[in-house]
Amino acid sequence: MHMVSILIVEDDITYGMMLKTWLGKKGFSVTSASSIARAQKTLETEQIDLILSDLRLPDKDGIDLLKWLGTQNIEIPFIMMTSYADIQSAVQAMKLGACDYVAKPVNPDELLKKIKESLSQSSVHPKQTIYRAPTDHLSEPNRPSVAAQQTMYSGEENVPRKEGLNGAPDSDYLEGESDAAKQLYNYVKLVAPTNMSVLINGASGTGKEYVAHRIHQLSKRSKKPFIAIDCGAVPKDLAASEFFGHIKGSFTGALTDKTGALVAADGGTVFLDEIGNLSYEIQIQLLRAIQERKVRPIGSNHEISVDIRLVTATNENLEQAIEKGNFREDLYHRINEFTLQMPSLKERRDDILLFANFFLDQANLELNKQIVGFDMPASNALLQYAWPGNLRQMKNIIRRATLLATDKFITLNELSDIQTSNILDNSDMLLRNEETEKNQILEALQHTGNNKSKAAKLLGIDRKTLYNKLKLYEIEL
């Protein structure tokens, strides 16, 4: 059955995103445009079943879009959103072919009713959509009320779900719709089918491991193993065993044979997270294994042939590490045949509310709650915050807010973590150079009374990364 696609034309980004998220939860496939020009481009390239357009837009107005549809002989149900002061324009829109109009602030029950009627007139029938808590928060963001749940359409009983990796529903990650996200995943799709080694650069919490998984799943190796190693968490004296394996009795504690990660991943992909943490000795052994495609377990006289694709990730500046003699240049060139730069969350403003609602859905399931969404002040706070810890920080904050929420909507009261002054809000959160990074760490430690856990949270990094930084900059507490 066809899932109904709706195009929202609205220049108020926050309001448009709330509408988009809300309708998406009702089972619609929703696209948004902030101007008439963008709407026209979307209509020329995508299949749209219904248009929900504001009257007043920055380049032209909804009337102009209606006229354009007429000149293009495009017949799509059209609902105009307008203030009470513009009812006369809405009447004009009806004369030009609009199915209906709805007054702003939009009443959800009224909007859903009009969408149903418009689609019925055009013989477009979506799957049955059982939606939760249609609310008045779109019209009264500060005092939301919740209507009873109800069934909107008759038809198939399958409730549409988000598609995840390879079409699987209920993915544990959202790729986003911002320009930065689209560019990133276009590169992922480009490099995935090749055997090129990929280096993923990005700040902590930006989703580097998901990208590595995605590269594997889109590659010709997708049916073979994907083995991930956190290089920062592997003890230095056990690193060789983790990578290359060992035979029983080769060293104290080697009670059984162990298969190394490179052998276990034969035919598939090895993902090395935070590769900058590898010791120089392991770097040499890894380079040899990559070059010769052979691995020798500790204590063994025999080499094992391996066929692996290498994907690595780091939030360090490896070129600076090479200059300081901490990272081998020849290994760097081996792992860096193709580079992907992960955008920070603050560079993906169009995705912020999408991710917030996505993490809310996850938290509702985990905590057995039924929070509907965010009220308008909370949505604005989410958009304005710098998000130094990126997606990982947002997930934790939304989870906490979901736990604390007592009403159907998350308010500023539950988002106190992003309301308090953050010493790093106006600084370079990507920690681009060592001097800035060291000073920010010292400032965070001073601000938290040398509490490492709180300092790591303030910096938007995990404790493991902070410990590595303290060691790197010889900061003693």
Image (spheres, rainbow, N blue to C red):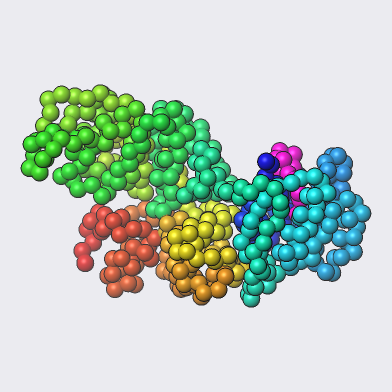
Q: Nearer the viewer, residue 264 or 346?
A: 264
Question: In the rendered image of this protein, does residue 317 appear above or below residue 187?
Answer: below
- Quadrant (top left/top right/bottom left/bottom right) for the N terminus: top right
Question: In the rendered image of this protein, does residue 316 appear above or below residue 249?
Answer: below
Residue 52 sits inside the magenta stretch: yes
Question: In the rendered image of this protein, does residue 254 appear above or below residue 105?
Answer: above
Residue 417 sits inside the magenta stretch: no
Q: Is residue 443 left or right of residue 139?
A: left
Q: Residue at x 39, y 60 (%)?
A: 460
Residue 187: x and y, percent?
51, 36
Q: Residue at x 65, y 73 (%)?
A: 145
Q: Is residue 75 left or right of residue 383?
A: right
Residue 174: x and y, percent?
51, 49
Q: Residue at x 90, y 64 (%)?
A: 88
Q: Is residue 330 left or right of residue 184?
A: left
- Quadrant (top left/top right/bottom left/bottom right) for the C terminus: bottom left
- Write down the quadrant of residue 56 in the picture: bottom right
For the record, the magenta segment spans 41-53
Q: Is residue 296 left or right of residue 131?
A: left
Residue 245: x and y, percent?
19, 35
Q: Nearer the viewer, residue 348 or 76?
A: 76
